Image (tube, rainbow, N blue to C red):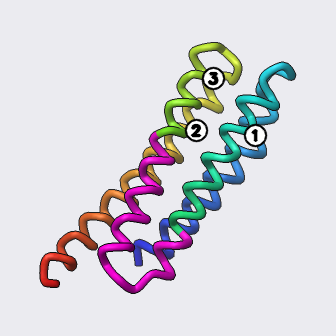
Amino acid sequence: MDVLIAGQKWEDMAYYIVHDVVKQLPRAERYAMGMQIRSLVLSVGTHISRATMIRDTRYKIREVAEADYALNELKTVIRLADRLRYIDKKKFEISVNYTAELGRILGGWNKSLSTRGQGL
């Protein structure tokens, strides 16, 4: 269940951040910071996708953790964009809500995997 939810929430977050947030960055930052944001968004999605395909719980846990690490890096860059006033408060708040929700989902997924992995 968490797998399907994580994938859908990632898609929603990715669309919003790439479509609305990156486009609002100042022209001088759109390439550098925009590229970093796009890369992190894609990294989160890649790790979620990999985790859905892996059967071995140990490796699945690792991929979910990597998705969470990339998500935390993304949060940091978005906070910096807000602090530098590159994005407006509304876009920042929506981005924070998307990333926080996905973070909770990844945390729950990781917890359920860790519980399952203890029986190995």
- Residue placed under numbered mark 1 in the picture: 20
Which is nearer the N-term, disc 3 or disc 2?
3
* Vertical order, 119 against 108 (above or below): below
Q: Which residues are magenta?
A: 49-72
Q: Is residue 70 left or right of residue 107?
A: right
Q: Which mark is residue 94?
A: 2
Badge 2 amino acid: Ile
**Cα separation between marks 3 and 2:** 14 Å
Q: Residue at x 41, y 72 (%)?
A: 2
The residue mark sitting in front, 3 or 2, is 3
Q: Residue at x 70, y 19 (%)?
A: 86
3 and 74: which is toward the camera: 74
The residue mark sitting in front, 1 or 3, is 3
How packed mark 3 is, by other alpha carbons closer than 10 Å (few <14, some 14-19, many 20 or more), is many
Q: Quadrant of residue 58?
A: bottom left
Q: Quadrant of residue 120?
A: bottom left
Q: Main secondary structure of the magenta part?
A: helix
Which is nearer the N-term, disc 1 or disc 3?
1
Residue 55 belongs to magenta span: yes
Image position, residue 60 (x, y; %): 38, 73
Query: Mark 3–mark 2 contact, CB under 8 Å?
Result: no
Image position, residue 37 (x, y; %): 66, 39
Badge 3 amino acid: Ala
Q: Is residue 71 left or right of residue 57?
A: right
Q: Which type of secondary structure does the marked residue at label 3 adopt?
A: helix
- Residue placed under numbered mark 3 in the picture: 81
Query: Mark 1–mark 2 contact, CB under 8 Å?
Result: yes
Q: Which type of secondary structure does the marked residue at label 1 adopt?
A: helix
